[in-house]
Image (cartoon, rainbow, N blue to C red):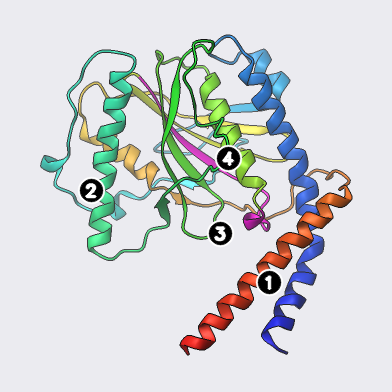
Amino acid sequence: MGVKRSIEAFIENSREDAELRVAQTNVVSRHLSHIFTTTKALKYSALTEHDLDTLRIKLSEQDLEGECSAGHQTFYQPLPKSELPEIDWEKVHFSKWHEGRKSEPRRVHYTLRSVSGRIYAAWFHDRKHQTWVHRQCYRAKPRIASGEHTPDVPYSWQIVEEMEADTLDIPHCSFQMYNYADPEEALRRSEVLAIVGFMRWRLNRFDYIKHRTFPVLVVSIFRSQARILQAYHDGEYLHISKSKFFDFTESRRENYELFARWIYSIPCGDTQTPLAIKGEELPQRSYDQINKGFCHLVRQAEAYHKRKKLKG
């Protein structure tokens, strides 16, 4: 069987699975859109228990040195300490502390970037392959889930340091965000908007057609406090786990090491199993889009094999 027929046979076998996938993730996409629209309209900064129940968001606690609380799947594991390369901490740029809702989170972000940059450079020097790539993992136009800076919102916030895996086999992504507000234990409006916006955009990408679950990891910074959140959608609920806040007022190496291990975490978990929900009935345009996506994959595969044949 020729390359083209092999590809076409594979795609034909995958078509039914793709249709089920789209039928299910369309349900998730609608729910995420509802969460985004409702949260965007909130005039207060922290979600209440009523908000969480109404929006079908399940919140749990995350121990950064341990496990998530019961009922929450894990899609990220911290990089083991043994795999963290040695770096010259004398060369890490610890920005000076200046009080302020804007200057404090930027200082934490700049120092985290300095630490993670030196770690990445050490891996590059040792030619050690890394799963994570520093690039935009949310490319919606306009990028409505990447920040707010207008006077009609409770506080301004901004997404920085986006990362995604270097392979389409891993749909996970991560980013950092600084929030120009005081830290509160409750789940914040900005955190939900960013998580939902990134997740929804990524699950609607045909590149990730074999995945049903799209995990998101967030380093969320408020003044000199920071915490880490993990999120995923199981088809019925948006699950978010959050860690306690860690204090970065002082330049404590152990805190920066811990967060670096999460920034370069190990993606895990099953993202391909069908969700435990009934998918929606697809309109004809959805079938047309699926066919169009598969035709694009065929052209890409044929071009790849042609280049490979020429090189060989």
Tell me the crowding category of disc 4: few under 14, some 14 to 19, or many 20 or more residues within 10 angstroms, Cα based. few
Q: CA distance from mark 4 to mark 1?
A: 25 Å
Tell me the SS state at disc 1: helix
> Amino acid under label 1?
Val
Q: Residue at 33% of width from left, 23% of height from top?
A: 105
Q: Which residue is mark 1?
A: 298
Q: Residue at 44% of width from left, 38% of height from top?
A: 175
Q: Which residue is mark 2?
A: 118
Tell me the SS state at disc 2: helix
- Tell me the quadrant of the picture where the N terminus can be found: bottom right
N-terminal label among 3 and 1:
3
> Amino acid under label 3?
Leu
Question: Residue 93: image x %, image y %?
Answer: 17, 36
Q: Which residue is mark 3?
A: 168
Q: CA distance from mark 2 to mark 3?
A: 26 Å
Tell me the SS state at disc 4: loop
The part of the chain drawn in magenta is 206-222
Q: CA distance from mark 1 to mark 2?
A: 40 Å
